[in-house]
Amino acid sequence: MHKILNILILAFLFQPALGFAKASVLLLSPGKTNESFWKDVDTFANAAATRLNLDFNVFHAERNNYLIIKEVERLIEDEELPDYLLVVNEKKYYLSY
């Protein structure tokens, strides 16, 4: 199992050298664009994405959680889903099984 995980991590890290396209990442931020904390998160995530050679974007919901749902619906409808989607569970919603 560890061998497979190591191979996947190496393939991800060296994807540009292997001829793969950049992986796309979208952060769905619940915060406002001008909030100090979320500005810091954006800056840190953008720096990490640059270092990892990722195509990184942020969607700010401006403190309206409904906008996150609408953005995901739009991405699905337009078939524009990123390779990785980062969602912040700020309201601590969860599914119980």
Image (cartoon, grey):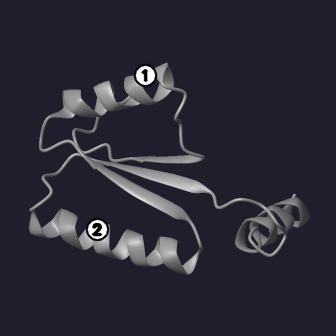
Please tell me the numbered disc located at residue 62: none
Q: Nearer the viewer, residue 53 or 68?
A: 53
Mark 1: secondary structure: loop
Q: Earlier in the sequence, mark 2 or mark 1?
A: 2
Badge 2 marks a residue whose secondary structure is helix
64 is higher (above) or lower (below) than 31? above
78 w.r.t. 15: above or below: above
Q: Position of residue 49 (x, y in %)?
A: 50, 71
Three-letter amino acid code of the residue under disc 1: Ser
Between label 2 and label 1, give the one nearer the viewer.
Answer: 2
Q: Residue at x 28, y 68 (%)?
A: 41
Left/right of residue 26 with respect to residue 15 in the rendered view: left
Marks 2/1: CA distance? 29 Å
| Residue at (81% x, 66% y) in the render | 11
When asked about the image quadrant of residue 64, the answer is top left
Q: Residues within 10 Å of mark 2 (few under 14, many from 20)?
A: some
Residue at the spot x=80%, y=76% of the render?
17
Toward the viewer: 22 or 10? 22
Q: Residue 13 location, x and y as percent? A: 71, 73
4 displayed left or right of 25: right
Label 2 with label 1: CB-CB less than 8 Å:
no
Check disc 2 and give the amino acid type: Val
Residue at image x 28%, y 34%?
A: 68
Horizontally, residue 70 falls left or right of residue 3, namely: left
Disc ID at residue 96: 1
Rendering coords of residue 34 (x, y %): 9, 62
Mark 1 packing: few (<14 Cα in 10 Å), some, or many (20+)?
A: few
Query: The N terminus appears in which quarter of the rendering?
Result: bottom right
User: Residue 41: which numbered mark, if any?
Assistant: 2
Q: Report the front residue among 94 and 57.
A: 57
* Residue 79 figure quarter: top right
